[in-house]
Image (tube, helix red, strand yellow):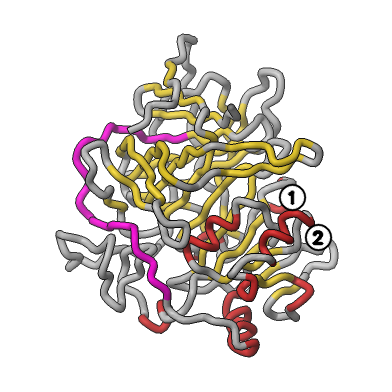
Amino acid sequence: MRKTILITLLSLTLACQPVAEPDSQPTITPFPLPSATAKTIQPTVYQTPTPGYPEEGFGPFNFPIDINPLMGLSTNPVNLDRRPMLIKVSNLPRDVRPQSGLSRADIVYEYYTEEGTTRFIAIYYGQDAEQVGSIRSARFFDEHIIRMYRGLFVFGSGDERVRERLYDSDFAERLIVEWQVECPALCRPDPVTNYLMGNTVALREYVRDRGISDERQHLEGMRFRVQIPDGGQSVERVYAWYSAVIYNRWDYDPPSGRYYRYVDVENALEGQPEVYKPLRDALGDVPISANNVIVLLMPHEFYSTSPEIVEMQFYGSGPAYAFRDGQAYELEWVRENEAGLFSLYTNNGDVYSFKPGSTWFEVMGVSSKIIQNNDAWRFEMRFP
């Protein structure tokens, strides 16, 4: 596996900070990062494997008709007889938080856009959400996700160069943008904020009415097992620092077996401390969490510096770090076919096993800095 990441240890004194409950005041985290501390998190009821989940698990190929290949869970086959729906969700300004519908997504990708900011691509397949958003514009990276998941892509316009690439593609008919669709599929329900929101059920109706292809796809590549893989290292807190403006962390909660997301409250400029609070879903007021947190490292290049437009090379292979059940794994992602999903591999060449359930991917530069400190790991976004 490629060793392109410089791993360093902090030599400064580490301060231990308490962790806020989801409904408590923000926590202030000074730089350097603290060691993980005991946590009290209010778990939410999520889809979980049944007691009879097979020991051999499912995937990466030949998924049964009722097993969601993006979560490894039993799902109504009707929900699987369709394409995944990919929706672009904003993460800045902070007024857009809490976002709506993220807890209903099978998979969420977070990635760098420009000027230190990030956005999300939320993938809805096994279940729907009556309100997702706020929905924002496309970027070049979205093309990779659309091709991998063979999905419908819902977005709110974009730079002319990005739009040109998307509409010149072989998936152009699966692009869904605001000016094409009426409420309730895409709406701006709040006249004060004017945020664009989507309803996945109504969007599916729009797709059917327009005759857009929406049949089951081959979505192979992920492997799922309940058993915790061997070779892990105990890590209870994961930081993903994209900039002094956008940063987050994931805290592992042993009782629920999930990672809970904490997000930036203030800019951490010029040595100011990082300030976090739990992120909740505006749809249902539940904390945002995931069964798996995966950091994917890949080359980032500037397509343009003014305005700032970034290209990511999500082909071939690269380093990856997986976190499940309080364990960390050093892996390699491999994407051999641009029309298919990528897979994660262990150092001995075996396909890595995800924990059945939801996954968040943090996409960062291949030159990013990794800081390991006992049971807390920190990833800091870097360009070459």
**Screen quadrant of the N terminus:** top left
Is 225 covered by the magenta stretch?
yes
**Which one is nearer the viewer's eye here, 210 or 234?**
210
Q: Amino acid at mark 1?
A: Asp
Circle 1/circle 2 CB separation < 8 Å: yes
Q: Can residue 101 be spotted in the picture?
A: yes
Q: Which residues are magenta?
A: 217-238
Q: Is residue 198 left or right of residue 3?
A: right
Q: Position of residue 342 (x, y in %)?
A: 40, 53
Which residue shows up at 23% across the image and 56% down it? Answer: 225
Task: Identify the image quadrant of residue 174.
Answer: bottom right
Q: Amino acid at mark 2?
A: Thr
Mark 2 or mark 1, which is nearer the start of the sequence?
1
Q: Is residue 337 left or right of residue 299?
A: left
Q: Is residue 164 above or below residue 41?
A: below
Which residue shows up at 28% across the image and 57% down it? Answer: 223
Is 330 covered by the magenta stretch?
no
Rendered image: mark on residue 193: 2
Label 1 to label 2, Cα distance in Å?
9 Å
Which residue shows up at 38% across the image and 44% down it? Answer: 333
